[in-house]
Every structure is written in C-alpha cells, then in structure tokens.
Image (cartoon, rainbow, N blue to C red):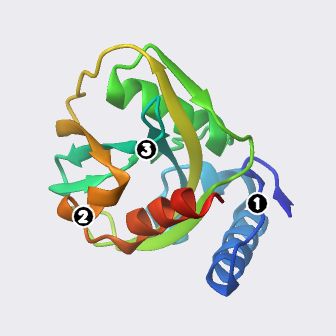
C-alpha cells in the first residue's frame, strides 16, 4: 500500500491497518494541504525518526521541551510533501549527528494522535509517519526544541516513557519487524 508523499507501508496488525486507512483518507481528501501546518483542516502529516544506535541496542530520544516528554525525533512537514525527507531532516536537526542511515525506504509505523488546543490553534490530529534509521557518525547536540538527548537501551525504554506509540516501535525492533 502506497500513498504519495508518504511511501509504502505493510501493516503488522489491525491497528496498523486502521491507522494507514485513516492516513490514506486524510491525504486523499486534502492533497498537498495535508502536509501543511494548517490545524484548521483537522490535522496534518508529521515525519518522525526512530534512530537506533550503531549497534542497534539503543534508540535516540529527545526530551521535548514543549511537551516535557521523552519522544522520538521528528516534526512538522511545513508544506514539504515528503514525510521520509522530513523525518530525516528532523533527525539531523534535532540530534546533531553527522550521518544517519535510513534502514528502509518503507514506513516503519503510523501513529495518529490528538494535539490539544494551544493559543489560537484548535485541537487537531498529527498523522505521524515514522521511519527506522541508524546513527552512523557524529556527536549528539540537542537543538533548542529539546531539554536533552539520550541513547536509551531498548530494554530500558519504560524508564523514560510510557507512551505506547514509542514502546510499540521498540517491540517491533525486538521482533525483527
């Protein structure tokens, strides 16, 4: 299954299939506007990177300043209709790493979640498209959007977050997905 600007995804279970169908329908309805940051269309596509350490045993998390939570790297497409590119761009910008490898051109995970109202923006959905990557070179350097960065061993992820959307990606790694 393929969506323009998103790529191909093979659902692992019913939840994946439902999220993919919702993402496909949203993109079909809004076209390029789905990749804008316009919260008044009900949401927008975001791109995220699940960046593994060179040995594959840890994942890079950012302590996101606005949300005060440990999350994977990622951000808004801001009009760029290429979620894979956005995920890679955000991974570089938020990590300071010099080289990151995309482990597959296919989508690794899709997570649709609500963003609460903030200022003049109403509540809206983030249609988050996630890609699996591996760090290859460089030193970590947190961006202004982050309180900190940390290499978190996959088996200690629950010490940093209880977010099912992050824990699910770690389970997929461990299962060899």
Question: Residue 9 at x, y = what percent?
Answer: 76, 60
Q: Which residue is mark 3?
A: 74
Examine the rendering and report whether any part of residue 128 can be seen. no
Q: Is residue 171 above or below residue 89?
A: below
Question: Residue 166 at x, y = what percent?
Answer: 40, 62
Q: Give the class, few, some or many, for how many residues have Cα within 10 Å of label 1's Cα (few <14, many ≥20).
A: some
**Residue at 70% across / 73% down in the picture?**
12
**Residue at 74% across / 74% down in the picture?**
25
Observer-side mark, 1 or 2, equals 2
**Mark closest to the chain's N terminus, 3 or 2:** 3
Examine the rendering and report whether any part of residue 175 can be seen. yes
What number is the disc on residue 161? 2
**In the foreground, 62 or 38:** 62
What number is the disc on residue 9? 1
Give me the C-alpha separation between circle 3 and circle 2: 16 Å
Q: Is residue 103 left or right of residue 38?
A: right
Helix, strand or loop at label 2? It is loop
Give me the C-alpha separation between circle 1 and circle 3: 18 Å
């Amino acid at each position: 299954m393929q969506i323009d600007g998103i790529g191909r995804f093979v659902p692992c279970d019913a939840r994946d299939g439902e999220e993919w169908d919702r993402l496909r329908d949203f993109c079909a309805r809004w076209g390029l506007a789905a990749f804008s940051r316009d919260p008044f269309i009900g949401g927008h596509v975001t791109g995220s990177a699940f960046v593994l350490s060179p040995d594959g045993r840890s994942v890079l998390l950012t302590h996101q300043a606005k949300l005060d939570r440990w999350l994977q790297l990622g951000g808004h497409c801001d009009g760029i209709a290429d979620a894979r590119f956005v995920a890679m761009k955000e991974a570089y910008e938020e990590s300071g790493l010099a080289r990151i490898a995309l482990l597959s051109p296919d989508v690794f995970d899709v997570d649709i979640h609500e963003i609460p109202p903030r200022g003049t923006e109403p509540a809206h959905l983030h249609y988050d498209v996630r890609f699996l990557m591996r760090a290859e070179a460089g030193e970590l350097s947190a961006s202004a959007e982050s309180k900190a960065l940390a290499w978190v061993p996959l088996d200690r992820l629950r010490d940093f977050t209880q977010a099912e959307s992050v824990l699910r990606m770690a389970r997929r790694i461990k299962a060899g997905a």
